[in-house]
Image: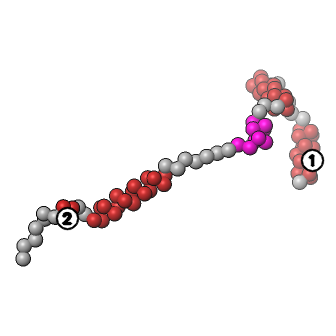
Amino acid sequence: MKINNNFGTSGINPYKRQMNKLDTAANTQNKKADKVEISSTAKEMQQLSQVSVERKQKVDELKIQVENGTYKPDSRETAKSILNFFHKK
């Protein structure tokens, strides 16, 4: 019996064809874009408020004091603040 390879796509591996279909399907699914929407409340929170400006100024002042070696924290006030913080919870 003689087998001829004259019939079109008989030389193509059918498993390879199936894998190509799966790869194509995976690529089309990965092309979906993610979408993020930010609420108006979050947008308001992103804007600089007067409190954050004042806080930044205070932090900058403290940084300068620490760098100069003139920052002297009050240990009693620090302890009171820590206790008040944990008693509120």
| Disc 2 from disc 1: Cα separation | 82 Å
Secondary structure of the residue carrying tag 1 is helix
Determine the residue positioned at 21% across, 61% down: 9
**Where residue 27 sits in the image (x, y, percent)?**
44, 52
- Amino acid type shown at disc 1: Asn
Q: Position of residue 36 (x, y in %)?
A: 64, 45
The label number, if any, that marks residue 10 in the structure image: 2
From the viewer's perspective, tell me whether residue 36 is left or right of residue 44: left
Dominant secondary structure of the residues highlighted in magenta in the image: helix
Percent x, y for residue 66? 78, 28
- In which image quadrant can residue 55 be found? top right
> What residue is pinned by disc 1?
84
Circle 1 residues within 10 Å: few <14, some 14–19, many ≥20: few
Q: Earlier in the sequence, mark 2 or mark 1?
A: 2
Magenta span of residues? 38-46
Are dots 2 and 1 in contact, CB under 8 Å?
A: no
Residue farthest along the bottom direction in this orientation = 1
> Toward the viewer: 40 or 48?
40
